[in-house]
Image: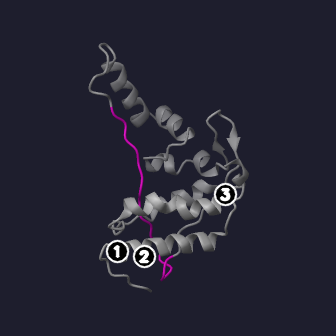
Amino acid sequence: MPQATGKFRVALLPTIDGTPINGEYGGSGLAIAKKIPDGKLDAAKKFVEYVTTNDEGIDTRVSNGSFPATTKTLNQKDFLAKTTLRNTDGSDNEFFGGQKYNEVFSQAAKDVTGKWEFLPFEPYARSIYGDSMGLFFSGKTDLKTAVAKWQIALRNYAADQGFSIVSR
C-alpha cells in the first residue's frame, strides 16, 4: 500500500506494570529440497552455510529484509541506524517515516520472554485479521473501530468454541 508509506512507526509493547517484556513470533528456515538435481547438493549446502555463518552472507540476508539471527548483527551500528526498507526493485522505502526502527526491534528482541502464549485459536484470529484491519489500512475506518471489530469477532468465536472470556 504505497499510500501508507511514512505513516507508521514501531514501538515497544506497553505492559501493565511497565516492565519491558516481549514475545517472539517469527523466524525463518533454510532447507534443501530432497530431490535436488544431481551435482547441486554441495552448492546448496555451501550457500546455506554462507548465509547462516559467514558475516558477509548474514549481512546480505539482513540487508534484503531478514531479521538478524545473531546478537552481533542485531547490535551493528549500520543495522540500528537504518531508516528505510528495501523494495523488491532495490529502491528505498520510507515506510516508517525516517524512524530508526531497528533500534526498537533490537530492544524488543532483548526483552523476549518464554512466557508468551498464543490464543488456542490463533490460526482463526489471523484468518479474520484482514476483515477488520483491512478496512483501516484502506482508509475506510479508523484504527480504534477496526481493532474493536476484530476484538468482537474474536470474543464471539471464543465463546462459540466454549472458551471463557475474562475482561481486565
The residue to which callout 2 is attached is 155
Q: Position of residue 67 (x, y in %)?
A: 49, 47
Tell me if 102 is positioned left or right of 158 in this view: right
Magenta highlight range: 15-31
Q: Is residue 37 above or below residue 90?
A: above
Amino acid carrying mark 3 in the image: Ser
Residue 121 seen by the camera: yes
**Where is residue 123, by image quadrant?**
bottom left
Q: Sequence order check: which comes first, mark 2 or mark 3?
A: 3
Q: Position of residue 126 (x, y in %)?
A: 44, 59
Amino acid carrying mark 1 in the image: Asp
Tell me if 79 is positioned left or right of 98 in this view: left
Which element is circle 1 on?
helix
Q: Is residue 134 above or below residue 120?
A: above
Q: Main secondary structure of the magenta part?
A: loop
Q: Position of residue 26 (x, y in %)?
A: 42, 52
Amino acid carrying mark 2 in the image: Arg
Magenta-drawn stretch contains 21: yes
Display colour scheme: one colour
Q: Is residue 152 above or below residue 112?
A: below
Neighbour tally class for label 1: few under 14, some 14-19, many 20 plus, Cα within 10 Å: few
Tell which residue pokes out farthest to the front in this image.
160
Which callout, 2 or 1, points to the residue nearer the camera? 1
The residue to which callout 1 is attached is 160
The residue to which callout 3 is attached is 138
